[in-house]
Image (cartoon, grey):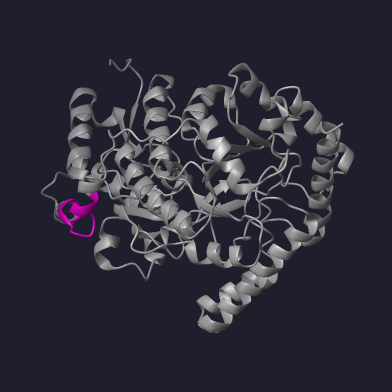
Amino acid sequence: ATVPAGKILSLGVIDGRNIWRANLKQALSLVTKAVEALGPDRVFVAPSCSLLHVPVDLKSETQLDAELTSWLAFAHQKIEEVVVLANAVLRGTEDPEVAAALTANQAAVASRSSSARIHNQAVKDKVNPSEICQRHSPYETRRAAQEAALHLPLFPTTTIGSFPQTKEVRAKRAAFKAGQLSEKDYQTFLEQETTRAIRFQEEMGIDLLVHGEFERNDMVEYFGEQLDGFAFTQNGWVQSYGSRCVKPPVLYGDVSRPTPMTVAWSRYAQSQTQKPVKGMLTGPVTILKWSFVRDDQPLSLTCHQIAYAIGEEVRDLEAAGIRAIQIDEPALREGLPLKRSDWKAYLAWAVAAFKRATALVNDATQIHTHMCYAEFNDIIEAIGEMDADVISIETSRSQMELLSAFTQYKYPNEIGPGVYDIHSPRVPDQGEMERLLEKAKTVLSSRQLWVNPDCGLKTRQWDEVKPAIQHMVAAAQTLRKQATH
């Protein structure tokens, strides 16, 4: 494209959204072409976007090994890369300082491309993204098998997964990580919290229980810590939304699952009750999108590697007697590419990854997924193609208006539209929840409808959660009574 006279061209040749060291040889080639065409006074060298999306300084990371550190660039290092490129043009590549920087950069690029810790041939041999994965039977057949296995009532109640991560829970985790609490004592504490959550749900009358996730820190970090191909920073914080910050995992290599990740806690929780307990997993797209992801292969391939590992966990949960398994995909909608023309391809591999993780379970195993607040109209057909038995979504803030997407599409499976907003400390009364459910019944049939909060309860306090759950269960019971008269 022609740059109008009097205009300056800013070249965003340093990736501002990821944490990998740039290939300065390739970037310099582009900058040089622009300078030859426009002159040095009309060319800026810059990151591709704001550096808000990457951590501040790699020098604060003291626990990453030298090899992995050599592949990374945080905000400070990206600015240094910009300076090297500018100096290479202005002073020439023979300048000693520039030459040393370019030589070190190419050594790091070569190291990363050939490292055995990145490439795992066993993973590459197992994962074929073009392989089509499907459940054994259509939904109606599965539904009958699940009804016989789970014995759930009309308008079944459940929660999305987590219960309050109180100050005590966070303090115990911190003490354990700091070596101030023994593994045995920490395990005992987590068992007590899990049992307490199970008893609470039984007392409230919840139909499909969860174990509470007291052992987990972040829904992505917890799994990344147990999967090969991930590394973790000490201070790699970035802004998520508002004042909330997260520390994304660094997904640097082929992904595999050395051992089961959640089976022990799900099995323990199930041993504490006669009611069914959901296994709780984070989905492959969300793990992908909420990590700093390797850029040396297609995102679709990396996502399918994660999906294969999650699928192994799903099958182990099933073998352990867990008859309902939730695989959360809150990032599915936010992962849409900026160009609408790229949406179809993205949704195809994203849906295929979810199906890879869920395809091999028995008909009687009920697969759930959860999605956060979003405009579902854009992706409703893809949601249908995921073929989850139950999907739970955030709808209370829209007063169930988001369900319009599901009626226009005639969504065939089961849905749990959230009946109260967990992002607020406010506790809605039973009548308010009943009114929302009545709205949902104008869109969904009674046999499709589940009753649950909008999202997980990790950030709430028990004195908020207890009355809210009590009201929610009472609202579901009212609907059941009405349906039988």
Q: Where is residue 90 in the image (x, y as percent from the top left)?
A: 21, 41
Rendering quarter of residue 46: top left
Q: Is residue 404 left or right of residue 300?
A: right
Q: Give the range drawn in magenta.
A: 108-123
Q: Could you tell me which quadrant the C terminus lies in? A: top right
Q: In this view, does 136 lie to the left or right of 104?
A: right
Whether residue 181 can be seen here: no
Q: Does the magenta stretch include residue 175?
A: no
Q: In this view, does 344 lie to the left or right of 182?
A: left
Question: Which is more toward the observer, 324 or 192?
Answer: 324
Q: In the rendering, at what x and y percent does residue 384 appear?
A: 51, 27
Residue drawn at the location 47% of the way across and 46% of the way down: 283
Depth check: 255 or 106 in front? 255
Residue under the point 46% across and 47% down = 290
* Residue 161 point in image, percent of width and height: 62, 53
Residue at position x 14%, y 51% in the image: 95
206 w.r.t. 446: above or below: below
